[in-house]
Image (cartoon, rainbow, N blue to C red):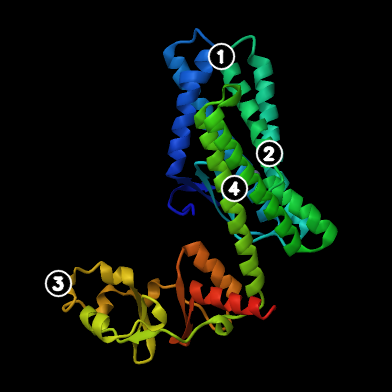
């Protein structure tokens, strides 16, 4: 669905990578323009044109700073409990902290999930105070403070909807988990609610687009439907992830790897490779092996990057991804850990190497097959 990994790195906050996804610019522009052009001019007539824009842009920036603070609150609590946080990304629907593992205890999950809304509530309160002190004196500052107080409260309410993976859904899951002791079942329930909320949003959004009740614009309907679609997707995706993790727990690389892959020597040409070697297992993927040692891997993308007329003069070793730039797995390595690495680096296959020699291959496909087999056997 949504490729959040195509984002700019902006630097680190408290040691956590902070990133901007390109879709964030769309939402930032939308918020800044609607504040400067519509919201503030309608509510507070009489400012200068420049004031509307300055206050509009500063308000938008502070809004996104509030979102970052919210995500940072989740992340710092996670880190406090020893759960690593990869990054915080701002994107079209706000912020997202990439927390690499799930909490192992309901109490931890509860605190991690609640930290964000609590932080937003505090920020909202601070802006409300600022509004109180400036409302009679400096109207533009008061306007900024009022809008930010409001939006932070909206953020709290939205996030407390009890559908996974929203914060409310996580709180909800932690409570069921706490009382039933069943992590999988609690996740299932919270995900179902999350999917239900997503569908409701889509339905409500479509109704708004066509009926435009209470003067709501078709655009807000579209937006709501869009958010609903995103929530439904995220709920389903996080459930799949939970299932995957559960199924791989306790297995090592050597137990889940496949031995079906194509091995080719480094000094043949691309032509020889394409016409002379089998695409074993249906993967567009080759292990480049010289005298038993893994030298690198070659994917279809590497091959496609070479113009066809150069196929008979280009050797595979010139276009392969060499071993030192490769992620490899070790036979005893935890399968779940390998999956996490593959997700983190967005790679589809990993050679399993022992003492420099290839002994197997792990691909997402064969992990899925492995999980499928286990579920068929009811294990
Ligand atoms: Zn949150």
Q: Secondary structure at mark 2?
A: helix
Tell me how far mark 3 sits from mark 1, CA to CA. Answer: 66 Å
Q: Outermost residue toward the bottom?
A: 291
Camera-nearest residue between 27 and 352: 27
Q: Which residue is mark 4?
A: 231
> Which tag is nearer the camera, tag 2 or tag 1?
1
Vertical comparison of 186 with 297: above or below: above
Q: Earlier in the sequence, mark 3 or mark 1?
A: 1
Mark 4 neighbour density, 10 Å: few (under 14) some (14–19) many (20 or more): many
- Front residue of 310/379: it is 379
Residue underneath mark 3: 309
Q: Residue furthest top?
A: 46
User: For numbered disc 4, what is the local secondary structure?
Assistant: helix
Question: Measured from the top left, where is residue 181 in percent x and y?
Answer: 82, 63
Among the two numbered marks 2 and 3 on one chain, the one whose residue lies closer to the N terminus:
2
Q: Nearer the viewer, mark 4 or mark 1?
A: 4
């Amino acid at each position: 669905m949504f490729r959040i990994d195509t984002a700019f790195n902006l630097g680190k906050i408290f040691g956590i990578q902070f990133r901007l996804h390109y879709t964030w610019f769309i939402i930032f522009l939308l918020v800044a323009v609607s504040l400067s052009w519509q919201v503030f001019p309608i509510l507070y007539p009489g400012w200068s044109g420049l004031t509307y824009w300055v206050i509009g842009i500063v308000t938008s920036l502070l809004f996104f700073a509030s979102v970052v603070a919210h995500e940072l609150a989740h992340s710092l609590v996670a880190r406090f409990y020893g759960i690593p946080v990869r990054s915080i990304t701002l994107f079209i629907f706000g912020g997202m902290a990439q927390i690499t593992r799930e909490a192992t205890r309901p109490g931890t999950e509860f605190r991690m999930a609640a930290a964000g809304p609590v932080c937003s509530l505090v920020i909202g309160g601070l802006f409300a105070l600022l509004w109180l002190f400036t409302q009679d004196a400096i109207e533009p500052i008061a306007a900024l403070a009022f809008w930010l107080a409001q939006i932070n409260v909206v953020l709290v309410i939205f996030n407390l909807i009890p559908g996974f993976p929203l914060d409310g859904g996580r709180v909800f899951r932690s409570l069921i988990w706490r009382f039933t002791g069943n992590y999988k079942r609690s996740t299932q329930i919270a995900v179902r609610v999350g999917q239900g909320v997503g569908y409701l949003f889509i339905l409500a959004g479509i109704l708004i687009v066509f009926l435009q009740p209470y003067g709501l614009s078709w655009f807000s309907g579209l937006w709501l439907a869009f958010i609903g679609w995103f929530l439904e997707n995220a709920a389903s995706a996080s459930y799949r992830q939970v299932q995957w993790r559960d199924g791989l727990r306790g297995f090592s690389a050597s137990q889940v790897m496949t031995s079906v892959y194509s091995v080719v020597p480094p000094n043949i040409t691309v032509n020889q490779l394409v016409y002379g070697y089998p695409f074993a297992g249906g993967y567009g993927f080759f292990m480049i092996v010289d005298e038993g040692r893994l030298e690198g891997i070659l994917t279809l993308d590497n091959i496609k990057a070479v113009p066809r007329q150069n196929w008979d003069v280009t050797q595979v070793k010139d276009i392969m991804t060499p071993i030192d730039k490769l992620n490899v797995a070790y036979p005893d390595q935890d399968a779940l850990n390998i999956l996490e690495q593959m997700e983190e680096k967005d790679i589809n296959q990993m050679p399993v190497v022992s003492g420099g020699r290839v002994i197997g291959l792990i691909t997402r496909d064969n992990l899925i097959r492995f999980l499928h087999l286990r579920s068929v056997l009811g294990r």
